[in-house]
Amino acid sequence: MDLSKIKTLIDFVGRSNITELTVTEKDVTVRIFRSSPDKAATAVAGAGQKPASTPSSGSDTPTDAVKTSHAVKAPVFGVLHRAPAPGEPPFVAIGDEVEEGQTLFIVEAMKVFNTIAAPRAGRVVRLTGIDGTEVETGDLLAEIA
């Protein structure tokens, strides 16, 4: 299965209300899922792989902002991009007000650019990812209060 078909499937899952899609073509199986219908992120697991579970926050003493914030996690393993292109300003910074569906990051996985959108409106209170570094599925990228 070529990457353009996979990207089309990812886009389809992102726009629809389904939470999981499995497609097999020849000897390749692609499974695209999202953990809940209200999240805009999707993830891909190859043939024979199980999707990674989402780890819980390891914070021992959360602040009030963290208690009322919503975590934005990486849906796939890949390279994190905080800006739309090299040399351009990042999509968001700490303190920015965002709207639901607004692009926060791009995660590049196998030359497919996955946009990570804000799951809800609010203020960005935490950014953890460094531009150009690899992120794992489930890594915390930001928190929106």
Image (spheres, grey):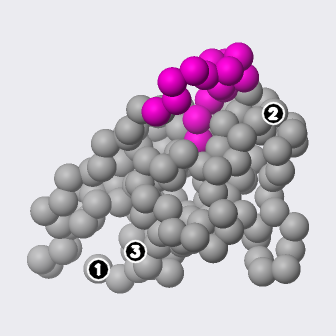
The residue at the point 76 percent across, 67 percent down is 83
Q: Nearer the viewer, residue 36 or 108?
A: 108
- Residue 21 visible? The answer is no
* Residue on which the image places disc 3: 5
Q: CA distance from mark 2 to mark 3?
A: 35 Å
Q: Earlier in the sequence, mark 2 or mark 3?
A: 3
Nearer to us of marks 2 and 3 is 2
Total labels drawn:
3
Spot occupied by residue 61 in the image (x, y as percentages of width and height): 57, 21
Vertical order, 127 against 113 (above or below): above
Contact (Cβ within 8 Å) of mark 1 with mark 2: no
Q: Nearer the viewer, residue 12 or 139?
A: 139
The residue at the point 72 percent across, 63 percent down is 82
Query: Does 105 lie within the magenta span?
Result: no
Contact (Cβ within 8 Å) of mark 3 with mark 1: yes
The residue at the point 58 percent across, 35 percent down is 71
Q: Quadrant of residue 120?
A: top right
Q: CA distance from mark 3 to mark 1?
A: 7 Å
* Residue on which the image places disc 2: 123
Q: Nearer the viewer, residue 145 or 43?
A: 145
* Residue on which the image places disc 1: 1
Spot occupied by residue 10 in the image (x, y as percentages of width and height): 45, 60
- Please, what is the three-letter code of the amino acid marked with disc 3? Lys
What kind of element bears circle 3? Answer: helix
> Which segment did they paint magenta?
58-72
- Please, what is the three-letter code of the amino acid marked with disc 2? Arg
Vertical order, 57 against 24 (above or below): above
Q: Residues within 10 Å of mark 1 (few under 14, many from 20)?
A: few
Q: Earlier in the sequence, mark 1 or mark 2?
A: 1
- Please, what is the three-letter code of the amino acid marked with disc 1? Met
